[in-house]
Image: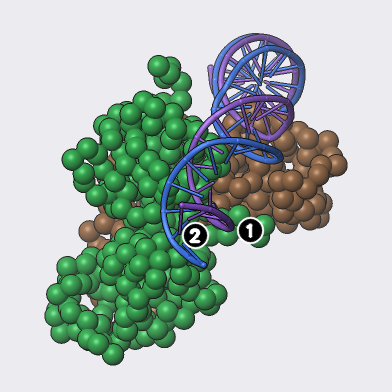
Chain colours: A brown, B green, C purple, D blue
Amino acid sequence: MAKVDTSLVAHLPLFAGMTPEALDEILREARSARYPKNSAMQGADAQCFFLLLHGHVRAAKTTPAGEQIVVRYVTPGETFGLAMAIGAARYPATAMAVDDSVVLIWPTSAWPRLVERFPALAANTLQTVGTRLQESHTRILEMSTQQVEQRIAHALLRLAKQSGKKLDHGIEIDFPISRQDIAQMTGTTLHTVSRILSGWESQGLVESGRQRIILREPHKIVVLAERSADSGAA
Amino acid sequence: MAKVDTSLVAHLPLFAGMTPEALDEILREARSARYPKNSAMQGADAQCFFLLLHGHVRAAKTTPAGEQIVVRYVTPGETFGLAMAIGAARYPATAMAVDDSVVLIWPTSAWPRLVERFPALAANTLQTVGTRLQESHTRILEMSTQQVEQRIAHALLRLAKQSGKKLDHGIEIDFPISRQDIAQMTGTTLHTVSRILSGWESQGLVESGRQRIILREPHKIVVLAERSADSGAA
DNA sequence: GCCTCGTTTTGCGCTAACGCAAACTACCTG
DNA sequence: CAGGTAGTTTGCGTTAGCGCAAAACGAGGC
């Protein structure tokens, strides 16, 4: 098993406040793996937890009826599959690589030992889980109070912020994402997303194509996102 | 400052795996307070965190436009106002006692010390925050895929489960809750909630009045909750 | 017992968004 | 290069639920 270069991950919030030796010890328990684009990453029960090193991962939750929602897109440096840290035996969501991805993998069984030995690990994880909880609440707030157009605007701005590639003529979302995906992030249908993006495209706000979106006028999209339900159109 | 009886709180998940001495030491840092019905419990910045001993607390989040959503109802034994544990300087939500309530209060400043001294505290908190995160995701899933009637059914069943008082003719939700509150939990309007509850009432599923709801036929409400969008009506 | 205020109910019109269906397009495969 | 597949666009009819407004109700205060 190839050893992971600590310098690549030392700066991550997960490892904040840890000595190089501690980090080294933690990394020794991990193995790394590569997942090709569009491959599923998890089985039903939570035997591992992951740290994404490279690529992009989509975490989604499925209804009994088979409909899906996107819980989040994981970007490099983030952890996922933390079911066991919160005491769940099975993953609440499924993960799938949307791009060729590289991850570090720890067996779930290592977690209790690691936490006991390095309490900062629990504290750091608490921070990130807490942040995600707040983001969830924000999302619930948006779904409760905003129209679809505003929600899509917010979703795209968030994606651009966390995975945006700066171009000279805008910001491109740096992984393949379909209308359907955006619909599943905002609680609507791919049809509605398509209509709205088409509208934006004809106004020059975005440029988009097959699984590809470029924000040409991020500033104007911010305005759209913040426009309250009753502020008049056009 | 009156000392808190450890036996009242020793069994709480927050203190799982702690010695009586540790518990005692933690409780020594807390003070208790009583909040009358309908009083606000927090200022803007997160100077304290709370453990609810008695009563019921409503945690709500407000939009820039002044609309509110209910994040959750806190039941006795649960913590709230944990902003600092996740590194936030200000509360993301506001708390208000919906019943006469009694809480334990710790100063935010005590948290880092407590966590360092009792690592189990962080681990336990991680568990509860993680559980809440999952509940949030479930709520997002419901808002994305279910109709209002199903969402209301789920919300009431959840309330009944966590704060239901068993009567011989059903389950009563054990604190004052208005149509507006339910609307803010399910992402709809008080009008729609009222209409749906009226409908249920005329079918004998519930009995309700001013800030008061009794589930008369919990079983049938479960059926309603699980009915998928397309399953035909009556 | 009467008054007042907050909550709930209900009617009515409207529209944002869905759902279905069909056409179109880009990409990948053989 | 032809064919197939997955993603996207668009039209059209429908409707769940909103928004407004007014009335009815009920609880607590004076």
The tally of labels here is: 2
Q: Which residue carries the number 1 mark?
A: B66
In the picture, the quarter occupied by the C terminus of chain A is: top right
Name the residue: 33% across, 74% down: B103
Name the residue: 22% across, 37% down: B169
**Amino acid type, residue under disc 2 in the picture:** Ala
Task: Write down the quadrant of residue B66 in the picture.
Answer: bottom right
Name the residue: 58% across, 59% down: B62
Name the residue: 74% across, 46% down: A230
Badge 2: how crowded within 10 Å, few (<14), some, or many (20+)? many
Residue C19: x %, y % from top left = 56, 20
Q: Judge whether residue A3 can be spotted in this image.
A: no
Under circle 2, the secondary element is strand
Badge 1: how crowded within 10 Å, few (<14), some, or many (20+)? few
Residue A77, numbered label: none
- Give B14 or D10, whichever is nearer the viewer: B14
Residue extending farthest bottom: B1
Residue A122: x %, y % from top left = 34, 70
Under circle 1, the secondary element is loop
Q: Which residue carries the number 2 mark?
A: B60
Return the chain for callout 2: B
Return the chain for callout 1: B
In space, the residues marked 2 and 1 are separated at their CA atoms by 11 Å
- Give B121 or A23, whichever is nearer the viewer: B121
Task: Write down the quadrant of residue B167 in the picture.
Answer: top left
In-image side of A204 versus B14 (left or right)? right
Residue A117: x %, y % from top left = 25, 75
* Dot 2 and dot 1 within a common chain: yes
* Residue B179 versus residue A195 in the image, above or below: below
**Amino acid type, residue under disc 1 in the picture:** Gly
